[in-house]
Amino acid sequence: MTLEADLTPERVFDQGGPTLADTGEQALLRALTDIARTSPATLAIGSGDDAAVWSPMPGRDLAVSQDALVEGVDFRRWWITPRRLGARALTVALSDLAGMGATPVWCSATLCAPPETGFDDVLEIQRGLCAAAIAAGCAVAGGDVSAIDGPLVIDIVVGGTLVPGAVLRRDGGHPGDVVVVTGALGRAAAGLRLLLDGGELSEQEQAWVDAQLSPVARIAEGLQLVSSGVRCGGDISDGLLIELERISDMSRCGAEIWLDRLPVEPALVSDFGSAWPDLAVGGGEDFELVATLPREGLAGLLASWPSTLAPLTVVGCLREGSGVAVLDREGGASLPPPRTTSRHFS
Amino acid sequence: MTLEADLTPERVFDQGGPTLADTGEQALLRALTDIARTSPATLAIGSGDDAAVWSPMPGRDLAVSQDALVEGVDFRRWWITPRRLGARALTVALSDLAGMGATPVWCSATLCAPPETGFDDVLEIQRGLCAAAIAAGCAVAGGDVSAIDGPLVIDIVVGGTLVPGAVLRRDGGHPGDVVVVTGALGRAAAGLRLLLDGGELSEQEQAWVDAQLSPVARIAEGLQLVSSGVRCGGDISDGLLIELERISDMSRCGAEIWLDRLPVEPALVSDFGSAWPDLAVGGGEDFELVATLPREGLAGLLASWPSTLAPLTVVGCLREGSGVAVLDREGGASLPPPRTTSRHFS
């Protein structure tokens, strides 16, 4: 492993230089492979062959997940640099492994770009992806490039390992479980609103924009949850409400969210007023984790939770029935559901 | 496993009915997951969670590859049905596993589609993908869906297993090796030309179009090659010339292609005249395999080759030096290289 990729100065999109049409597919593949080779050498056959090959650890199960970022839907070129975009694309996919309690091993990326895209822009995307892969200890196994008469598409696949059975499943919850989340909620959704609105940003607002552009995958937190015996959970990519709907559906029960318990920055409440639950419950892309566990396990989990990890907060419970109710507090009144912000097909 | 997916009548694109904008992301994900569940149940956790999970076979290495089809680059809606498109997308990716000599185990798909896409069109793509997965014995592990303001994108990841070391690598060739290919070359490229030209098709021409639209992944042939001790090869997705350039580059030697030995249908030569080498050497997407092996192993390989598989043909050799020369025959004159037809960035 070298840090060569990190020494190239970062650039913003569309700053000129040769395009993909100028350099062609073969030169692009060679340059992408050269960058991929700076990632951890955990593969038997890495980038450059028909497929990547590796030897699984004996006694480990394998996890795989796939996640796409599409220009105009998930990002716009003027609000993110190509290097941050590459890192973000991988982080979004790694978050799914975190949501299983898995350890990342490899990743692979398809990039669709119009021929007029800057060659250096694409290399910057790959450098960002590689930097994030190095940080997560996972190899860049290869992927595909294609021309497209349309927006940039970055589709990432990640593979990881887990101890058989020691996994956070969506169908592992039971009525009576408490619901916990990692970190703080609503920051990335606040950042997205600010990006869409445009305009000058305060220091606080810039921090929310950074939460949107450079999220963190809660890999260590997922591992800590499964090693503590937690067996139900996932990552909050589409917002707490939608993820808890999936968990309660697949666990065949209902759920409650207690608004007064949500880990939300006071500035978010003061800046966004009554809209803050839309961000913290309906808004996604914080990439925090949600998990459920029997109430009697909670004290032990919290007592053994390392202070170096994102903190855990109890935000609700699973219950008999179906659907997710949003209450002002435990045992309190039911509120209209916050607005969710899926960006797809609506 | 059920055959439910196969009983739905096939439809062509854009025949009306609800769009993705009408039905929304959650209904789409549920319907896609329902279809995915008709695929082989080889996974511990299948479609519907953050990630798919499976237990690797002890003593097997794992192979993974990724391949995207982009509307307007790889296909047009008016020349293929959505069901054939789904099957083709998976087959193209499976061909990379064939090119390693690997056995398919799982696949995963990202679909980017504009909101005005027909809901039933997307389900048809998934049905075609599932039918091809069932035929290959591999599970549909999940994937992602996204809106896009642009063309359809189907990005497939496939995972397989292989016996450690028993793999077709691009860097496994040596000067003096003979070069063999499976099946016949140039048919899919002929079909592509006919599709781009439009017009009425003869029965022969329709067969070439079918070769383009419904290719076959040479999985069994790849397995037979590695079990016969062959250790160098790949699939011919971008044409024999480009694949042999990759193999000779990575094996640090040169190569020769002997035109008179190529397995080409006589009708292809008579219909396309002097352009037939552009199709058979420069044209891709037949998804046949190419392999190299020491000349002394050839007789044994051919003698033990099952008649149920696509036949093997010797088409050239590796030699000292670099680059791929196209000769009229073994020991003959060097010809100008046929035109290659990469569809990307040029």
Image: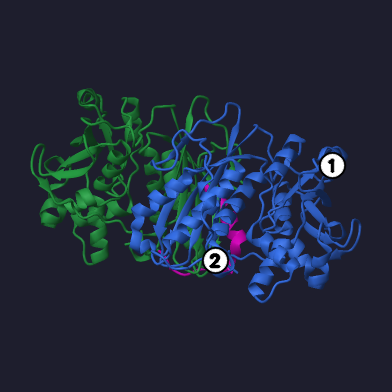
Chain colours: A green, B blue
Q: Nearer the viewer, residue A26 or A246?
A: A246
Q: Chain of mark 2?
A: A
Q: Nearer the viewer, residue B49 or B207?
A: B207
Where A329 sits versus A175, above or below?
below
Q: Quadrant of residue A189?
A: bottom left
Query: Judging from the image, what secondary structure is the residue with disc 1 in?
Result: helix
Can you give x and y, in whole percent of width and height, for residue B275 in the image?
78, 71
**Looking at the image, which residue is at 44% across and 65% down?**
A151
User: Disc 1 marks which amino acid?
Assistant: Leu
Amino acid on which disc 2 is placed: Leu
* Image: magenta residue range: A13-36
Name which quarter of the figure residue A152 lies in.
bottom left
Whole-percent x, y for residue B239 in the image: 70, 59
A305 or B133: which is nearer to us?
A: B133
* Residue A162 located within the stretch drawn in magenta: no
**Magenta region, main secondary structure:** helix
Mark 2–mark 1 Cα distance, whole angstroms, equals 43 Å
Q: Position of residue A175 (x, y in %)?
A: 23, 31
The residue that label 1 is drawn on is B302
Label 2 residue SS? helix
